[in-house]
Amino acid sequence: MRVVQKYGGTSVADPERMRSVAEQIARTHRRGDEVVVVVSAMGKETDELLRLAEDVAGGDRPGREMDMLITAGERKATALLCIALHAMGVPADSFTGSQAGFLTDTNHTNAKILEVRPDRVAEALASGRVPVVGGSQGVSTERDVTFLGRGGSDTTAVALAEALKADACELYTDVSGVFTADPRLVPDARKMAHVSFDELLEMTAAGCPKPAMRSVEFARNHHVRLHVRSSFTWEVGTWVTEEETMEQAIISAVVDDDSEAKVTIAGVPDRPGIAATLFRRLADAHVNVDMIVQNVSEDGVTDISYTAPKDDLRTSLEITQALADEIGATGVTSDAGIARVSVVGAGMKSNPGVAATMFETLAGNGINIEMISTSAIRISCVIAADQLERAVVVLHDAYGLGS
Amino acid sequence: MRVVQKYGGTSVADPERMRSVAEQIARTHRRGDEVVVVVSAMGKETDELLRLAEDVAGGDRPGREMDMLITAGERKATALLCIALHAMGVPADSFTGSQAGFLTDTNHTNAKILEVRPDRVAEALASGRVPVVGGSQGVSTERDVTFLGRGGSDTTAVALAEALKADACELYTDVSGVFTADPRLVPDARKMAHVSFDELLEMTAAGCPKPAMRSVEFARNHHVRLHVRSSFTWEVGTWVTEEETMEQAIISAVVDDDSEAKVTIAGVPDRPGIAATLFRRLADAHVNVDMIVQNVSEDGVTDISYTAPKDDLRTSLEITQALADEIGATGVTSDAGIARVSVVGAGMKSNPGVAATMFETLAGNGINIEMISTSAIRISCVIAADQLERAVVVLHDAYGLGS
């Protein structure tokens, strides 16, 4: 069996955790499995490097140099992990993204993988060694070092698993799998033994932090078997697989997210092109708009509301206010005190009552719904942030998700 | 004018020092000079990375992985310096040793440069940019990352200056040049305006810590003009040049060193090959033996004494004791309480009284000489460590070196 194991930053945060991870890799190697390791930077190192860059120079910082800086974190981690493995008698070689054959575009700080040619990784495997690859990095078509962005190590692992035709890709993290709700909010939240790609994709889009959405998308498109599991308990986690033919659970999980703020532009003249202009400008400013709701037009004017990351609120407000002035809208307001609760389930497609249950449950608990958006297998409601925990608990209960 | 500027770890120890260095580079660039920068890891970072490796695994650590780990330090520094330059409006690109074309052998942790092909560095220069190269690193003939060893950044700078046909190589450090003696020991020690390669080479061999001896050797062999100067005061430092034809100063400097210990093997049968065996074994164990003294044979037995770094004392003793047992020598003793004082001067060749002055001066001040070694332009004496400071002061005075 050939397996790719990816260890996140918390899994290798200090020398002790590093040794613990090395032991797991050694066990896998001793079992006779071929193991390829992908590792993130230790603990909060990426944040520390970013802070160092801020201390050196405020304002605009060149992407090429930020990538050279940030990728030093994974480089350290790969070398230290190999040193730990070597001390346990396991032959191991570190590889940078470039050495592992990750060719990317030139979009620094958030590069896209163009091709993976893991020749050196395959050679190491063939000679009985454990290749340890730096996550989230590659080399661009201009021969510069590139970073794939935060959470990019998951994508590195999945792309390597695909290129090496691995039997599975294990994403080790600080939670023991994918849960029916955040166990910190819902005491009887249950770890799911399986989840479909489509469901996990909706969950990550709705705020489930791990694994990174991009990696789930890649795994789904390339049929890579994912296993989300813990590097602290080492227990079996959650398998992510193709949608199964058997009866689907109507609702699989409740997901919460309080990272976004809401912006509303009111009194917008109801003529074509205004919404398009707004969201094009926001996109050009790299504001990642999530939900969009436009009210029914009344007396020739309408309201447009959208949610976007709180970090982008200032930019969002500036762009929206500028447009409001141009088109003579009556005003722009924002609310950072909102949150989103979502229910996700592949079985909801054929069960029309799911949305009604959600709205009734929230209303019955005095929770007001401010915005609604849906996909084929997800319903999301924006509510007041201080009612989020209660909403997750009552919905988890209403759909009978507890263990 | 084309200049290579090398900044050591103390010169870029924190964001403030990093900005100060960036300002100097920006000034050079604005003057219209072509400037290539070589930078070491920030402050004590290399030591911290070594400690991290020790925390992860004791004992033997693979050189390939140590190099991958250590070179992360210079990578961070190059990127941060470019970020600082960019904020000052100076276009700059960071390059790893590999990107800068440093091809090395596969001798990890202490690799030797085989060839420098700085195509990308030259391209950056040609387009008006400032290339910032990671010091002490390269890529091996096996395509692995290599480290040139401690102090290797000086060598990187000198090799780049040679490959790029630079007009000068400026080695910035935390002292303002090369002095006639350590100014901490001798208050009226004088900064030398010029020093010859041969003298500086002897001084670095005798304990003068900067610049790294290997880089001085390279610069001498390839006729690279060196300028040793301070990144704290920015004043003119010491130029290192080919030996001049004009009258040489008899003595240029007094150099002190307390990093070594002395080992003596007594009662050695006086037959050929014993010394050869001893020093071959020490060399094989990477013990860097410095001075060697063998006494005149008496009654068919002799004593051999040598000095070696204190860090290697345990290894040295083990090897020497083992040989003593084999050959029936009477005993092995060691003394870590020694130091070496040297006088260096290109003019001493034609002045036979120099050694006599040194011995008389030491004797006249009650300082006993335990070992002596000489080269054409240097005389070194091993004395008791607690008399070192006094020895430096009286010799500096005896040769009239003060300002």
Image: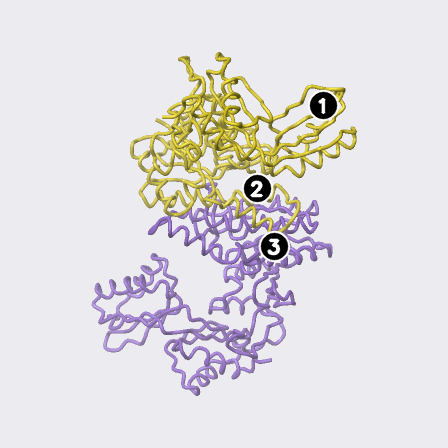
Chain colours: A purple, B yellow
What residue does disc 3 label? A161
Label 1 Cα crowd, 10 Å radius (few <14 / some 14-19 / many 20+):
some
- Residue B270: where, in percent of width, then height? 75, 21
**Which amino acid lies under the numbered mark 1 shown in the image of this protein?**
Thr
Callout 1: residue from which chain?
A: B
Q: What SS does tag 2 mark?
A: helix
Q: Amino acid at mark 2?
A: Asp
- As drawn, A276 above or below B225: below
Helix, strand, or loop for circle 3?
helix
Q: Could you say which is closer to the camera, residue A298 or residue B165?
A: B165
Q: Residue at x 65, y 56 (%)?
A: A3
Number of the label disc, if any, that sits on residue B302: 1
Quarter of the picture holding the C terminus of chain A: bottom right
The CA distance from mark 3 to mark 2 is: 27 Å
Query: Viewed as shown, does residue A402 lie left or right of B83?
Result: right
> Which quadrant is home to the N terminus of chain A?
bottom right
- Asked if marks 2 and 1 touch (Cβ < 8 Å), the reply is no
Residue A292 occupies which quadrant of the picture? bottom left
Q: Position of residue B235 (x, y in %)?
A: 33, 32
SS type, badge 1: strand
Q: Nearer the viewer, mark 1 or mark 3?
A: 1
The residue identified by callout 2 is: B67
Circle 2 marks a residue in which chain?
B
The mark total stands at 3
Q: Foreground mark, 2 or 1? A: 1
The label nearer to you, 3 versus 2, is 2
Q: Residues within 10 Å of mark 3 (few under 14, many from 20)?
A: many
